[in-house]
Image: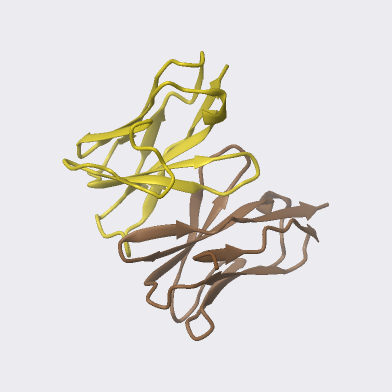
Amino acid sequence: GAVVSQHPSWVICKSGTSVKIECRSLDFQATTMFWYRQFPKQSLMLMATSNEGSKATYEQGVEKDKFLINHASLTLSTLTVTSAHPEDSSFYICSALHEGDPNTGELFFGEGSRLTVL
Amino acid sequence: RKEVEQDPGPFNVPEGATVAFNCTYSNSASQSFFWYRQDCRKEPKLLMSVYSSGNEDGRFTAQLNRASQYISLLIRDSKLSDSATYLCVVTGNEKLTFGTGTRLTIIP
C-alpha cells in the first residue's frame, strides 16, 4: 500500500525553540495532507488541512502563527511548531490523501512524531 | 452535539467473544465511512471501508445505517491481537472527521 513517512519520530526541545516535522508521501502524490495532534488516551484532533501550493486551512482554535504549515510540493508537507512550550508536547500525526478525493480517497498516516517540550 | 460520536469504552471482552460497537454521525450529507484501528502510540491504520450494503472481511463486519445515521463494527471470535482503539471516520464536504475512538481490550 501507499507509504507516508514522517520525521522525526521523537523530538525533545527546550521551551521557546521551534521544531519542524516533515511528512512525505513516498510513492504517490498528495495534493491534500492533514495534520493532527493527539493527547494521551484521546482521539486525533484535526489541526489543519494542507493543500499543495496554497495556504493551509486551520481548524477553529488552532493558531496558524504558532503552527506553520507548508505544502510546497506534492510529496512534502511540513509542520513547524514555533516558540514551543510544554503544553505543545503531544503526538503529532500527518496523513496524506491518496487519489485526491477527500470523500472517497483512502487516507494514509505517517508514523507520528512525539514532541516533548522541556 | 459532536459531529461523530463513539462510546470511548473501554470494552473488556473475553477472547473468543463477539463484540460490536457503533459510531453515530450528525451530518446526514456524509458520504463515506471508514473504520480505523490504532494501537497504542502508533498511527491509525485503515481497517475497512463501510459500504451502504454492508461489508465483511473475515471476522470483521461493518454496516451503515443511513436512516439512523450510524455505522457499526462487529468483531467475531475476538483475538488478543484485536486489542486496540477503533476509530470511525466520516467524510463529507471534503472534510474528514474522526470519532474519539473506542478502546477494546481482549482478555485471555
The residue at 69%/51% (across/down) is: B83
Give whichever of B82, A72 is nearer the camera: A72
Give whichever of A37, B75 is nearer the camera: A37
Residue B22 position within the rendered picture, expressed as x and y whole percent measured from the top left: 61, 70
Residue B17 position within the rendered picture, expressed as x and y whole percent measured from the top left: 77, 66
- Picture quadrant where residue A41 is located: top right
Q: Is residue A105 above or below residue B44?
A: below
Residue A110 position within the rendered picture, expressed as x and y whole percent measured from the top left: 42, 38
Question: Which image quadrant: the C terminus of chain A?
Answer: top right
The residue at 63%/52% (across/down) is: B85
Name the colour scheme.
by chain
Identify the colour of chain B in the image. Answer: brown
Q: Is residue B12 above or below residue A20?
A: below
Describe residue B59's horizontal placement relative to residue A51 as left or right. Answer: right
Identify the colour of chain A in the image. Answer: yellow
Describe residue A52's horizontal placement relative to residue A118 as left or right. Answer: left
Q: Is residue B39 above or below residue B105?
A: above
How many labels sit on residues? 0
